[in-house]
Amino acid sequence: MNRNKIVAGNWKMNLAKNDAIKLTEDLVSDSIPEGVKVILAPSFVHLDRVGKLLEGQSSISLAAQNVHAAEKGAYTGEISVDMIKSYGCSYALVGHSERRAYFNESHELLAQKIDALLKNGLSAIFCVGEPLEIRKDGSYKEYVSQQINDSLFHLDASQLDAIILAYEPIWAIGTGETASPEQAQEMHQHIREMISEKYGEAKAEALHILYGGSVKPANATDLFSQADVDGGLVGGASLKAEDFKSIIHYK
């Protein structure tokens, strides 16, 4: 199957208001190549302004970096699905390695967040990946399989249509290290085979699996050319318009 590429920019906790506006304006003025979908995940405080700048065009979508599983309530500092939806978000990141590591988010909690998004008609970009010690001991496939099994496999086949998977080897995030194209392909192929066993080949072939781990203009083409790599979840390089546009125009 010829799946379109997705290039998602996760701004994390970066950019003041004017910088966020300038970056968005630069991207909106660009001509997005046919067959490429761009997703921006700014900080919560920028969702309103970035969302308004994205109105009227279809090639760039808006995502939240996180979401709470509850519909509403006494959760000071948290953001609900209904809130991000009201600002034009179509997606939310779920299970990013930094949320797992710094905020102790469990597989069960991530499953609840995914359910909340799908219940409200939004899609999840679900992140999986192994730390360095797991990569070194050779159990990385089993580690990622457990993450997927415990947070995704309660979904039925139709719900899988609202899921984008992102493989982010934790040892390659913000370190300057990158999994080789062959390492990325190995894990992406494993994930697709796992989805095929659970939901069937057609669902597995339709699923987008992104690579997230120090994606840069210099390596995007090699990574995205792998058979099972359907684009990237980009961190640092998404903060610079020219770098991010180079990744979008990877061919």
Image (cartoon, rainbow, N blue to C red):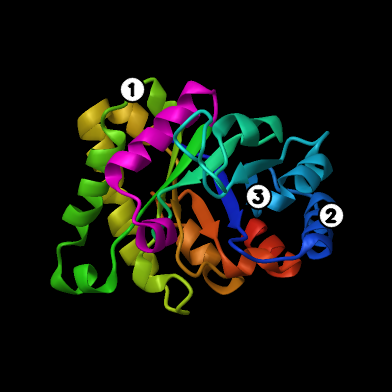
Helix or strand or loop: what does disc 1 sit on?
A: loop
Of 23 and 177, nearer the camera is 23
Q: Quadrant where the C terminus lies?
A: bottom right
Task: Determine which quarter of the picture holds residue 183.
Answer: bottom left
**Amino acid at pointer 1:** Ala
Residue 110 in the image: state x and y as whole percent: 36, 42
**Amino acid at pointer 3:** Phe
Label placed on residue 157: 1
Q: CA distance from mark 1 to mark 3?
A: 31 Å
- In this view, the residue farthest toward the bottom is 176
Helix or strand or loop: what does disc 2 sit on?
A: helix
Category of crowding for the residue at label 2, using alpha-carbon neighbours closer than 10 angstroms: few (below 14), some (14–19), many (at least 20): some
- Left or right: 200 as drawn, with respect to 60: left
Category of crowding for the residue at label 1, using alpha-carbon neighbours closer than 10 angstroms: few (below 14), some (14–19), many (at least 20): few
Please report the bounds of the magenta region as a residue range.
98-122
**Dominant SS type (magenta):** helix
Residue 81 in the image: state x and y as whole percent: 56, 33
**Amino acid at pointer 2:** Glu
Confirm whether residue 206 shows in the render.
no
Category of crowding for the residue at label 3, using alpha-carbon neighbours closer than 10 angstroms: few (below 14), some (14–19), many (at least 20): some
Task: Report which residue position mark 3 lands on.
Answer: 44
Task: Report which residue position mark 2 lands on.
Answer: 25
Of 111 and 2, nearer the camera is 111
Residue 227 within the segment the image draws in magenta:
no
Helix or strand or loop: what does disc 3 sit on?
A: helix
Sequence-wise first label, 1 or 3: 3
Task: Determine which quarter of the picture holds residue 141.
Answer: bottom left
Residue in view at x 32 percent, y 26 percent: 155
Q: Quadrant where the N terminus lies?
A: top left
Residue 112 within the segment the image draws in magenta:
yes
- In the rendered view, tell whether residue 89 sits above or below residue 13: above
